[in-house]
Structures are given as C-alpha cells and as structure tokens.
Amino acid sequence: MKSIQVTGKRLKKQNKEVTSYISSIFWDRRLLKQVLRINTAHTLALYEAGEISEKDAKSIVNFLKSFTIEDEVDEDIHYLIERSAIKKLGIDVAGQMNLGKSRNDQVATAIRMELRETILSVVEELLKLQSFILSLSEKYKRNLIPAYTHLQRAQPVLISYHFIAYFDSISRSVERLFSLYSRVNLSPMGSAALAGTTIAINRMKVAELLSFDGIIRNGIDAVSSRDFVLDSISCIITVALDLSRFAEEIVLWSSSEFDFIELPDETTATSSIMPQKKNPVVAEIIRARSIVPLSSLVSSFSIMKALPYSYNLDLQEVSPNLWVAFDTVRDAVNMVSRIVSSLSFKVEAIEKKISHDYTCASFIAEYLSTSKKVRFRVSHAIVGEIVRSSIKKKIKFGDAIRTLLPVISKKYSGKKVLLSEKEIEKLLNPMEALRMIKTEGGSNPDDIDRELKIREEILERDMGSLNSARLRLREGLEKLEKEASKFGCS
C-alpha cells in the first residue's frame, strides 16, 4: 500500500521550520502518559464497538504500552504517537487508531487528566504546609507577638493565633481546589472534532476507564472551552497571594528592625561583600514569583477573549500558562514549608518589645467603657490623649495612666475615673488583657487549645478527601490496565 501520512493528502508536506514553529511537542511531553492512556481506552472502545479486530487491538495496545518518545520534531504528541504506530505496525493496523477521535477531544482530555493530578499534588503540598503550621502553633501556643494594621503595632496576639489565620486562608484555597477538581474531572472524549462521531463509542465507559466522574455533553464545549484552565489559574493565584503575604512578613520579621524570628540557614544567603548579612532570599523569591500565575492568567484571558467556537490552534498557547502557574506555586508552597518547619521565634525579645508599648490601649478603652460606665467614644478619646501625652512627655504608658487618667477622664466625661494598681497591671499585661476577650474565635489564651483542635479536624478531613480522590483515580486506571491486559498487556 502507498505510504500515507497521518495529516493526509490535502496539503503538501509541511516545511520543518514551520512545523517547529507551531509545534507543542516540548509541553506535550508532560502529557505523554495521559495521551497513551487515552489511546488505550479509545482502542478498547473501538474493539467493543466492533470497529477493529481483537488482533489489531492487541497490537495497538501493546505498542502503546511500550512507546517511548523520541527526540524528533513533530506538530504534537498525538501525531508523533500515531506516526510511530503506523511506522511500527503498518497502516492496516495503526490506520484505525484515530477512528472516532480527534486531536481536539484528545488534547482537551489529556490536559484535564494531567491537571487533576496536578491539582491534587498542590493540595497535598498545602496540607503538608498546614501540618507544619499546626506544629509551629503548638510550639508557640502561648507566646505573644504584636499584630499590625497599617504596618503599625495594633494589638497583642498569640503567635499561634497569627498562624491559625494562615491555616484558615489556606483551607479556603484547599476547598476551592477540591471544587475545581470536580469541574475539571469530566471527559471530553467522544466529542471528536466538535460534533461527536458516527462510531458507536461508549463515552461513559471511556470516561470510567480514564477515572473521570462523567462526560462533557456538548462537543463544541468539550473541545474548545478552556474556562477550566482560567478557573484553575484563578484558584492558584489566591494561593500565590497568601504565600506572597507570608513571605513579606518573613522578610519583615527577620530584619533587625523587627527581630522577631531566626530563619533556618538553608533558606537564607549572605552578602558577597558584607559578611554579617543573613538575607531572606527564599522568601524574597517566593514574593517575586507570586506574580507568575497572574501573568499566566492575563495571557490566557487575552488568548481566549476573541476566539470563535470551536477549536483554534490558539488554544495550544493557553496550556503552558497553566503548567507554569501551577508548578511555580507548588514549588513555592514547598519552600514555605521548609521555612515554617524550621522557623524559630525570639519570644523573649518580642515580649520585651511589647511590654511597655501601646498595644493594649484598645483593651483599656473597652474596660473603661464596660467597667467604669464611660461611653466608648469618650473612653477612646481619654486613652488616646493619655497615649499622646505619654509619647510627648517620654514617660511609660503605665505611669501616664496612673498620673493622667483622673485628670483627662474628668476633662472628657465630667467625672474622675480611677483604676486600681491591680487593674492597671492586668490591663497592661498583654496575656492577661487577652484573657478578657469574650468573642468566639478571638485570641484568648484559654481558647487556643480548642481552636487548634478544630484545625486538626479540618486537616484530617481534607487529608481524607485527598486520599479518596486519589483512590478513585487509581481504581479507574487499574480498571484500564485490567481491560488492556486482556489483549496481552500486563
């Protein structure tokens, strides 16, 4: 039989330079195992539909089982596999491989298969990070740190309380990724180019063999929509944002101006000229690379915004943005875990810094309102003027309260307000002041064990969800291998 190219005879053979320009083979290498699985499942579907013989099915499945990619230029991985199959098996056998399917539904399926595994790998890294966060929180369960608003000291909180904030934010990202996973895990296979196929492919069976939860019913939507990519990058941007904010705090806290933490040596570097330096370089790179997913999203939206339905090769340029965004963030999560797992707080230095500052001022204002029956806006003004006088006269906050409260309270409320020495000491003691917090979810030291327990349960739940998702994937692919083994494959 005369040699036939997989691209047919409509056009002359493509120039190698053009093929190289439009080729996606570099990025397709990532999809190889998924494309081989898709071809295997499709071959089984063709056999069940009576379109190929058992002998041909066996030859094709065995070829797919042993296929390895070669360093040659081709338009994409799909053509490369089919071309290699024809070369090895002949056109009479391999010429049926693409019956009832298109590169359009195949590439959309391969992206979804690879993406769902990538999503779960990011979830796994996030759960590891949360585990390290809980360990750090347990270690510094009742140690203090000043919390900030406008990068000004605001109120004292527990270190554990601060890190629970990170934990909770990451938990929402995990929830979004699980929700995303359910939208990604639908099969386009059987849509062919866009309208379906005249071959009686059992779409649900193919989806089951490829571990999908269902199918995308409309063929045009299945092959040409990439909203799941935009959705995915949007989700990962939120993770990158959290990591960037964490990295910024690490940079600040490790500076001599803050001097809150000691970073592990492996995440820092010294200067090429200043031998005393310990620069937080890993945190700085995390902060810098957090913009990568956003640039990926802008690029992807820009490619998609004016594309008509159905498939256009422009879509090929969207996928690299997806992989770059996810790989960048997954690596960053791993680096943050390295920092958190070895981070140490200078607790004595921190407590010394806040022992005579003004971070308990809001507690004092509330105490005057609740215990001394001063209207809160009035008590706010009283404490504010005491703070200003303390700074102006360069006297400690406690001494300013003792000497100025009776006078200033008389000025604003019309009555002299007095605090006992015991009350003053309690209000100026950050740990005792925190124990006055009554609202659920506040930074009360007496509640921290319960709060950590809640997060441990959340982590355990999400680990269970991750394991269940991976089990379902594994079971489906094991079924594919079992079906393929009937044709002589192990």
Image (cartoon, rainbow, N blue to C red):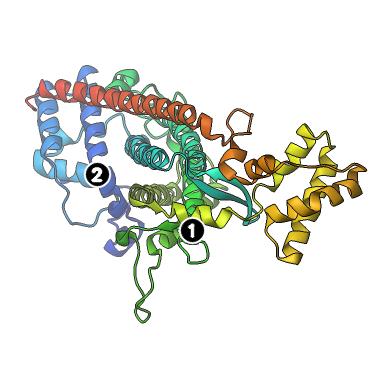
The structure residue drawn at horizontal position 80% and vertical position 49%, both measured from the top left corner, is 405
Q: Is residue 294 visible?
A: no
Q: Residue furthest right?
A: 414
* Kind of residue sitting beneath label 2: Val
Residue 450 point in image, percent of width and height: 48, 26
Q: Nearer the viewer, residue 376 or 422?
A: 422
Residue 251 point in image, percent of width and height: 47, 61
The local crowd at label 1, few if under 14, some if 14 to 19, many if 20 or more residues have their Cα within 10 Å, is: some
Q: Which mark is residue 253?
A: 1
Q: CA distance from mark 2 to mark 1?
A: 60 Å
Dot 1 falls on a residue whose secondary structure is helix
The structure residue drawn at horizontal position 46% and vertical position 54%, both measured from the top left corner, is 348
The N terminus - image quarter: top left
**Residue 178 placement: quadrant:** top left
Dot 2 falls on a residue whose secondary structure is loop
Q: Residue furthest front?
A: 421
The structure residue drawn at horizontal position 63% and vertical position 33%, both measured from the top left corner, is 437
Q: Which residue is mark 2?
A: 6
* Kind of residue sitting beneath label 1: Trp
Residue 228 point in image, percent of width and height: 47, 37
The C terminus - image quarter: top left
**Residue 16 placement: quadrant:** bottom left
**Residue 378 placement: quadrant:** top right
Q: Nearer the viewer, residue 106 or 381?
A: 381
Q: Is residue 4 left or right of residue 370?
A: left
